[in-house]
Image (spheres, helix red, strand yellow):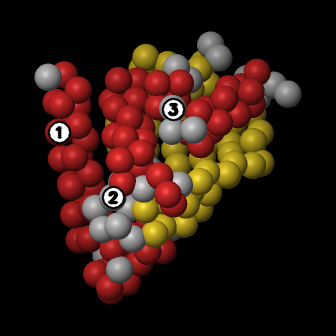
Amino acid sequence: MHPNAELLTRFYTAFAALDDAAMATCYAPDARFRDEVFELGGRDEVAAMWGMLCAATRAKGLDAWSLDFRDIVADERNGRAHWEAHYRFSATGRLVHNRIDGEFEFRDGLIVAHHDRFDFWRWSRQALGAPGALLGWSPMLRNKVRAQAAKNLAAFRAGRAG
């Protein structure tokens, strides 16, 4: 197995265990992360996002949590993986099964770019119920979710600092 495939295996194994500190060690200091909700720069910001999500799951949804990953492929520069998470969305208490495809760029044995793709409308129907089913396709709801997530992350980071 290529060392970067081992890195991704370590990352997802840590994620399945909700070990955000171990996840953070997989990223380069200047790492970038992007998905349907977040666009982040720097290991500290990316690590804080994983920390927030792991903390919320430990606090409000451990009963529903599971993460499976497969199809890890990586070489010196690039990699990809498929992962599926079952969890309780902390804001609504609704159960979610999210299917995500991750793409990665590596440098010096660390993740420098991480882009996760998932069906936002499918996610919003599960996480938000009727509003997600009715408006999950719309930029308005996506922007509202992004704004709330950014606000939550800023509060989480401020709480860690204080």
| Residue 100 visible within the image | no
On the image, the x and y values in percent for residue 77 come to 68, 26
- Asked if the residue at tag 3 contacts the one at tag 1, i.e. Cβ–Cβ closer than 8 Å, the answer is no
Q: Which kind of residue does numbered mark 3 sit on?
A: Asp
- Asked if the residue at tag 2 contacts the one at tag 1, i.e. Cβ–Cβ closer than 8 Å, the answer is no
- Crowding at dot 1, Cα within 10 Å, few <14 / some 14-19 / many 20+, comes out as few
Q: Which residue is mark 3?
A: 19
Q: Which residue is mark 1?
A: 155
Name above or below for residue 105 compared with residue 141.
above
Q: Quadrant of the C terminus?
A: top left
On the image, the x and y values in percent for residue 161 come to 19, 22
Name above or below for residue 6 compared with residue 72.
above
Q: Marks 1 and 3, Cα distance to the nearest angstrom?
A: 20 Å
Residue at 47 percent of width and 52 percent of height: 62
Circle 3: element type: loop
On the image, the x and y values in percent for residue 93 come to 35, 67
Q: Marks 1 and 2, Cα distance to the nearest angstrom?
A: 15 Å
Residue at 48 percent of width and 67 percent of height: 96
| Residue 62 visible within the image | yes
